[in-house]
Image: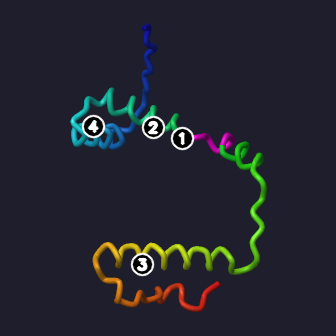
Amino acid sequence: MPMGAIQVKDVPEELHEALRRRAVEQGMTLADYVLDLIRRDLGVPSRREWFERLATREPVKLRPGEAAEMIRAERAEREAQIAAALGLEDVEVEEDADDAGRD
């Protein structure tokens, strides 16, 4: 399959060196590393695409504090599952100080 080529000019030396270091850390050539960055970037929707998708969704209607309650309930369930897996069913799960009394 034919492949295109991209050449980037006027790359500041410090940026070029940082990219080169990252490529070495990953065991990649600079070209392969930059190609991987491009693939990852294109794998994420653009801001425009994200807003277009968001516009097609139904709005979520929650009463004040409901989201915080749902998060606390999920955290409590997760903590209970972890405690059960560790054999700590009798241990009381403490509420996060940051979440206490907030809505």
Q: What element carries label 2?
A: helix
Q: Residue 23 carries which label?
A: 4
Considering only vertical position in the picture, is 59 above or below 43?
A: below
Q: Earlier in the sequence, mark 1 or mark 3?
A: 1
Amino acid tagged 1: Val
Name the image quarter holding residue 64.
bottom right
Tell me if label 2 and label 1 are in contact, CB under 8 Å: yes
The image quarter in which residue 83 lies? bottom left
Report, in whole angstroms, how far the alpha carbon at label 2 lies from the one at label 4: 15 Å
Q: Which of marks 2 and 3 is nearer the N terminus?
A: 2
**Where residue 65 appears, x then y in whole percent?**
69, 80
The quarter of the rendered structure image containing the N terminus is: top left
Instruction: Give the number of the disc on residue 44.
Output: 1
Circle 3 Cα neighbour tier, 10 Å, few/some/many (<14 / 14–19 / ≥20): some
Image coordinates of residue 33 in percent, x first then y, are 33, 33
Is 59 situated left or right of 6 in this image? Answer: right
Alpha-carbon distance for marks 2 and 1? 7 Å
Disc 1/disc 4 C-alpha distance (Å): 21 Å
72 lies left or right of 90: right
- Please name the residue that numbered disc 3 is placed on: 80
Q: Magenta span covers which residues? A: 44-49
- Residue 24 or 15: which is nearer the viewer? 24
How far, Cα to Cα, is label 1 from label 3? 34 Å
In the rendered structure, are the residues bearing label 3 and label 4 in contact, judged by CB atoms less than 8 Å apart? Answer: no
Q: Name the residue under label 2.
A: 40
Give percent across and percent down for residue 50: 66, 45
Q: Which residue is drawn at 68% across and 77% down?
A: 66
Residue 26 is left or right of residue 96, and the answer is left
Q: Where is residue 14 in the image (x, y as percent from the top left)?
A: 33, 43
Sooner in the amino-acid sequence: mark 2 or mark 4: 4
What's under tag 2, amino acid-wise?
A: Arg
